[in-house]
Image (tube, rainbow, N blue to C red):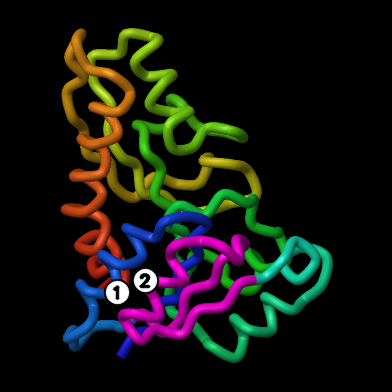
Amino acid sequence: MKRIVIFASGSGSNAENLIKFFHNSDTASVIQVLTNNPHAKVLDRCKKLNVSALSFNRIAFSKSEDVLNILEVSQPDLIVLAGFLWKFPDFILEKFENKVINIHPALLPKYGGKGMYGMHVHDAVVKNKETETGITIHYVNENYDEGAIIFQEKCKVLPTDSAEDVAKKIHLLEMEHFPKVVEKILNR
């Protein structure tokens, strides 16, 4: 049985979707969720779903080896960033080489990089009058949103779409594709 650790910063809808998808799976299970936000709704979701969840601060994450030690004890086969907003430290990436993936709410390389997350991305897509957008699932490297692309799925952006409309379309793509792509990666 493969082991998944999820990192999230916010509401945790993608984390919950992954937890539920793998709940009765023979392939994998989500063994833990880690968050940099002690008030994140993902903590409530994990409590309801009976999944171990911990919050940590910046020092524990990038200035000490506290989070790395947690990961080494957990021994995940895959670390999944699901709405996690901090840059991953190189020393963790080195220990878990090619085992850290992220989902991004745009078609990378467009609308990636520092500060490009959530509604910031959707606002930029609408402002720039894009005709399509989508999701990208990619490996995490030392730079924001620059790791090798694993999967992309597109959706149309209508001239009448608001950023909120785009966010809803992206959310549907995430819910449909993210768990299946994670499963494929684990089955390789």
Image side of residue 179 versus residue 89, left or right = left
Q: Residues within 10 Å of mark 2 (few under 14, many from 20)?
A: some
- Disc 1 versus disc 2: distance between alpha carbons? 10 Å
The answer to which of 125 and 50 lies nearer the viewer is 50
Q: Amino acid at mark 1?
A: Ile
Label 1 sits on a secondary structure element that is helix
141 relative to 65, above or below: above
Is there CB contact under 8 Å for labels 1 and 2? yes
Mark 1 or mark 2: whose residue is earlier in sequence: 1
Label 2 sits on a secondary structure element that is helix
Q: Residue beneath label 2, please? A: 45
User: Which mark, residue 163?
Assistant: none
Image side of residue 102 versus residue 54, left or right = left
The answer to which of 33 and 150 lies nearer the viewer is 33
Locate the N terminus by quadrant.
bottom left
Q: Position of residue 111 (x, y in %)?
A: 46, 26
Q: Residues within 10 Å of mark 1 (few under 14, many from 20)?
A: many
Q: Residue beneath label 1, please? A: 19
Q: Amino acid at mark 2?
A: Arg
Q: Which residues are magenta?
A: 30-55
Image side of residue 58 versus residue 6, left or right = right
Q: Position of residue 178 (x, y in %)?
A: 26, 56
168 relative to 20, above or below: above
